[in-house]
Amino acid sequence: MRKAPLLARTLCFVPLAVLAACSGQTSAASGADGGSTNPNDLQASVGPIDVPAGVETTVCIVEPLGNTQDVVVDGIDVNLAPGSHHLIVYLTSAEVQSDPVNCTPFAGIAAGTDTPLVLANKEHANFTFPQGVAQEIPANAHVKVEAHYINATSSDIQGHGTVTFHTTPKASAPPYQPASFLFWGTTNIDIPPGASVSTGPIFQVGPGGTHFLSVTTHEHRLGTRAQVWESKQAGDLGTQIADDKDWSNPSWRLLSPTFDFDGTNGLTYQCDWTNTTTQTVSFGESALDEMCFVGGYYYPGTSLDLRIDGHKVR
């Protein structure tokens, strides 16, 4: 089997290979005519995607978002169909590709062409940025929608998903600071058959002079708990901000007040798993492998802050 590029194999939480081709799909990225009643709303969607029983697949499309002027994102709504492991919407410099194609996840991050706007890892979620903070989307933007599906049932399903961005024209927006996404995790995962394993607390220093305003976690099907703390230093577990015991329904929590990174403090995260299979499970991109990540929005930020095993990748 041909392996994906090294960065994709190291970073993504989607499969190494597509297990089946899809057929009969339609897709769209659109403005207010995509079902929203707000004329400033923008929508990115994909589907329906045919996902036969027992199949895991990842598909991508690239579409114009439909904004003719610079806008700022005030809030986000996510709606995914059952069987969706995650959906990611990126700003991209790629050319339009309206028909869903099998894709290598996170390849655009490696090339520097894709910047994630939202990583949706639950069926339904909504998020509103606090006053004075917003994401930026340039005029005439292209977005890539990356959709990962896994059908563990005995019947075929139709996968689809929509992300709605609630926006304001930049020219008329009140003063704000730009928000970006951070995603930190570890590849040091080894879970023997029948064993319960924990990473133990992992401390990561945050980018100094910024403010962490929301938190989410990411594990796969064997995950039993993912915890995150605000930490003054390594070993400080004084303030817990996430304690997720359902891997399929992680936090999307807005922090109030924000946690201010000063260049020495940061986040501590820990993941626990119980391996109910007969095989050793390690880090990997398939939903049958495992992951441990903490993510969220921070400001001011101009790009993705991606750190793997303590190393800043981007």
Image (cartoon, rainbow, N blue to C red):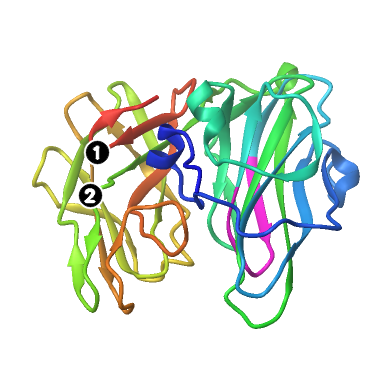
In percent of width and height, residue 308 lies at 30, 37
- The foreground one among 282 and 36 is 282
Q: Is residue 81 magenta?
A: yes
Residue name at image x 28 percent, y 46 percent? 187
Label 2 near label 1: C-beta < 8 Å? yes
In the picture, measured across the screen, residue 120 lies left or right of residue 95, that is left
- Numbered circle sitting on residue 309: 1
Q: Outermost residue toward the bottom?
A: 154
Residue picked out by circle 2? 188
The relative height of residue 83 versus residue 301 in the rendered view (above or below) is below
* Picture residue at 46% right of the left edge, 34% below the top: 5
Q: Is residue 110 magenta?
A: no
Outermost residue, front direction? 1
Q: Which residues are magenta?
A: 75-87
Q: Amino acid at mark 2?
A: Asn
Q: Secondary structure at mark 2?
A: loop
Quarter of image, res 151: bottom right
- Residue in view at x 32 percent, y 33 percent: 307
Give the camera-side residue of 288 and 220.
Answer: 288
Q: Quadrant of the rendered structure where residue 125 is?
A: bottom right
Identify residue type, mark 1: Asp
Q: In the image, residue 279 lies at what x, y percent?
A: 30, 72
Apparent side of residue 269 relative to residue 115 in the rendered image (left or right): left
- Relative to 270, residue 305 above or below: above
Magenta span: predominant SS is strand
Q: Secondary structure at mark 1?
A: loop
Q: Is residue 133 visible?
A: no
Q: Position of residue 105 (x, y in %)?
A: 55, 41
Query: Would residue 165 be found to the left or right of residue 291 on screen?
Result: right
Q: Residues within 10 Å of mark 1 (few under 14, many from 20)?
A: some
